[in-house]
Amino acid sequence: MIIDAHAHLWKKQNGIVGGKPVYDVGGGKSNFGGEIKQMMPPYMTDGENTAERFLSNMDYAGVSGAVITQEYIDGNQDEYLLSCKSDRIKICALYEEKEMGDISGFDGIKICAGRLADKNLLNHLEPFRLAERYGKFISIDLADGDEQCSEMHKIAEMFPNLRIAIGHFGMVTRENWLQQIRLAKHKNVFIESGGITWLFNSEFYPYPSAVAAINEAASLVGYDKLMWGSDYPRTMTAITYKMSLDFIEKTKEISEENKKLILGENAKKFYGFKELPVPQRVKNMVED
């Protein structure tokens, strides 16, 4: 069973970056705060990043389940995600530096910590309290390096029963990234790799430096604390969804036992997925 710990969905993009709007302009492109960027694969011509399209990609890649996080640059997608929730898809409510509403229909809460106006996480304890109280998890993307690590250590100790997933593999290509990885020494903190192919994009597939970083992180906290994530669909502007996990599946630098942990077993336990069927592999047109 393979589980994607970090993906995005939206029906209509209506986000913000640096105080400026982010919105679809067609052909998979978005106006990103005044700059046109390829936000999705170009065949997503209507700007809709839907669950139906994602599930089709999951089936083709052999992925059984996924966790949908959120980002300010896409806009709040709470309402749409509630319609996407299923046995295969777990969803996060978005924390927006204000009192949160009803989170009962969500599996977790997403905190875009690196984009907070007030980056002191100790001033944002409400989502952590709510998540622990109601048995939800926290998905959090921290600011680069160790800027918010001391606060996260305190929060992990304050909420020992709260499941916390650190995203973007600790912003692995930035200085002091290992300080974020060390947070997983707390029993309730895990690391997920959503965005790792973005961070190593200049090297490109099969991302040998990303594989080396995974092994380096495991040497500090263990393979049982690491989870694979794709950052779909943004990373699919450079590679296919299958390639986002294929570089881990095919490397000889990680044992088969540890690949199983990273690609699914850890996430199954952390997020509470039930036993899910493995999508049947369909031979594609270029294969003999």
Image (spheres, rainbow, N blue to C red):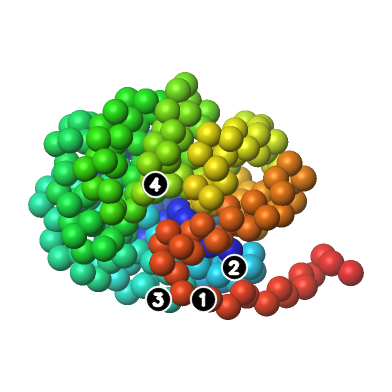
What is the CA distance from the residue labelled 2 to the residue labelled 1?
Answer: 8 Å
Residue reaching furthest to the top:
175
Q: Amino acid at mark 4?
A: Lys
Q: Which residue in the structure is indicated by mark 3?
A: 86
Taking the spot 45% from the left edge, 23% from the top edge, the residue there is 176
Circles 2 and 1 in contact, beta carbons < 8 Å: yes
Pinpoint residue 77: horizontal percent, then vertical percent.
Answer: 29, 60
Sequence-wise, the earlier of marks 2 and 1 is: 2
Total number of numbered labels? 4
Which of disc 1 and disc 3 is earlier in sequence?
3
Residue for badge 1: 275
**Residue at 24%, 47% in the rendered image:** 159
CA separation in Å, label 2 and label 3: 16 Å
Residue appearing at x 18%, y 60% in the figure: 133
Query: Which amino acid type is shown beneath numbered disc 3?
Result: Ser
Q: Secondary structure at mark 3?
A: loop
Which residue position holds label 2? 1
